[in-house]
Amino acid sequence: MKRKVYSVLCLSALIGITAPATAQVDSQLSIHGYLTQGYGIANGGTFLGVSESGTGDYRNAAMQFRYALTDKGNVTLQFSHRRLGQSPVVTDEADVKLDWAFVGHRFGDVDVRIGRTPIPAGIYNEVRDVGVVLPLYRAPFNFYLEGAFTSETVDGVVASYDVVPAAGWGLEFSGFAGGWGMINRMTIDSSYAGLAVRVEQGLGGQFWLTTPIDGLRAGVGASRQEIDQGDFAGTWKEWHASVDGTFHWFTARAEYRVFDLPILDYAAYYGYLGLHATERLTFHGQADFADLEYAPLPSVDFNDAYTAGASYAFQPNLVLKGEAHFTKGYWADAPVIDFTSDRPASVNYVVISLSTAF
Amino acid sequence: MRGMNQIVMVLAALVLGAGRVAAQDGFVVIVNEASSVTELTADDLSRLFLKRTTQWDNGQTVVPIDQSENTDARARFSDAVHGKSVSAIKAFWQRQIFSGRGVPPVEKASDREVIAYARANPNAIGYVAPGSALAPGVRAIRIIR
């Protein structure tokens, strides 16, 4: 019942905020927000909360308040709400949580943010809940691991530095340091559960190179972190590489990522192609893979996911999406299977969603 | 001698033509009268309005002023300066907002409001439709290609 009430409230908000809205309240305060409401149904099991019986308890929403303290400084708060059906990774998640709380200041070309701040990592990490920015409902799952093993934010400091080394070229460096909480998905008594862990001594950085070819950029990044408890406790190392081409008729993206954990290595990579049939209608295709090295087992083909979809942007801030996902591997919520002994499961699912922002 | 005159006339036409580029594109870029800026490249303008460049040479923070998204001047400016549609620029700002990196320039609904805002802010830069009456306190600048 509680979930139904939330759904109704969210849908009401969706209708409300798609009306013309003024984000700039006055010269210092600006208010922004986003909402994606989805419906998903699966075949062959449950994938990240999308079950065979279907669920509308599937959404991301946030409200952001930014106050300009000076012409170079600001304080920003963002509150968020997320539902992934009955997925174990959101079982203990608060209905509304403090997503961001940071003070930002620009020192010349260096932008510094202190507090709970989005982590710059890859193409999507900072915006992976923002439906109007994402081509599909979520950022590629094998790479970004929504809900578990990764974090969108760091409690610490993020600094970014922009330079123009030559006409047409751009170079952006971002670095972060601090800690964060996250969920590590565990198998306990033949079912999945989320274990809340704390990351400390998190440290990372990323370079983006913007090329003279309008819309084409490439990036590399790396990080390390210490996990305090659970099967994956210890030092994690990670690196990733990204290529992002956004052009008039198409968008092409590819990323590669490796996690070096104390007991295993995890590699994820994907390719995405979006064809812009018109300014509003885009067709999407994505192939997204994950491999696992867990000695002494041979390399495990951990998850293969293929996605086809289409989106229609009534306006830049009102987007309808439909997508079909075909997965085979060990990431599904159900059936619960053991990658060391069981055959991979095939779970297919469809998500229809409507996203808005202001 | 006649050939020399023709060369001079062609050169003069090119120089004068460069000064009218903005108007030919369907907008005129304006700054506060106190600004020392007299000309900018289209790339400079794009960086200012996308807030990739945030300071004038004197260290003051740039205050860009956009027009509302449904105005002709906004569409022409977006196409000529950014080389992208207004929708693409809005998508850029959505990404900036929701990654916590920044918010878009203030938007004004008409040429008159842009001029009034630029007049009141020494570090402002905006654009208006060609033929708009520029009030005292603001002046047009040249766009170099």
Image: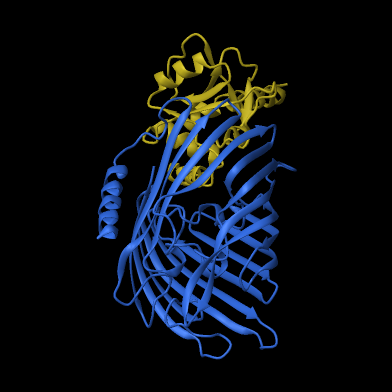
Color theme of the render? by chain
The residue closer to the viewer here, A105 or A243, is A105
Give the camera-side residue of A201 and B54.
A201
Picture coordinates of residue A150 (x, y %)? 57, 62
Image vertical order of residue B16 relative to residue A267, above or below: above
- Residue A211 visible in rendering: no
Q: Position of residue A138 (x, y in %)?
A: 46, 62
Tell me: residue A44, above or below residue A109: below
Q: How far across and down, in percent of the image, does residue B135 sit?
A: 46, 11
Chain B rendered in what hue?
Answer: yellow
In the image: residue A232, left or right of residue A39? right
Which image quadrant: the C terminus of chain A? Answer: top left
Please name the residue shown 64% across and 20% down the image.
B37
Tell me if A347 is positioned left or right of A15 in this view: right
In this rendered view, identify the residue nearer to me: B139 or A91: A91
Farthest residue, direction top? B136
Q: Quadrant of the N terminus of chain A?
A: bottom left
Residue A320 lies, with reference to residue A158, above or below; the image says: below
Task: Answer above or below: position of A155 versus A68.
Answer: below
Q: Residue at x 41, y 69 (%)?
A: A87
Looking at the picture, how far across and down is residue B137, in whole percent?
A: 52, 10
Q: How many marks?
A: 0
Residue A232 appears in the picture as rendered: yes
Specify the farthest residue to the right: A165
In which quarter of the view is residue A72 placed?
top right
Residue at (63% x, 79% y) in the render: A292
Chain A rendered in what hue? blue
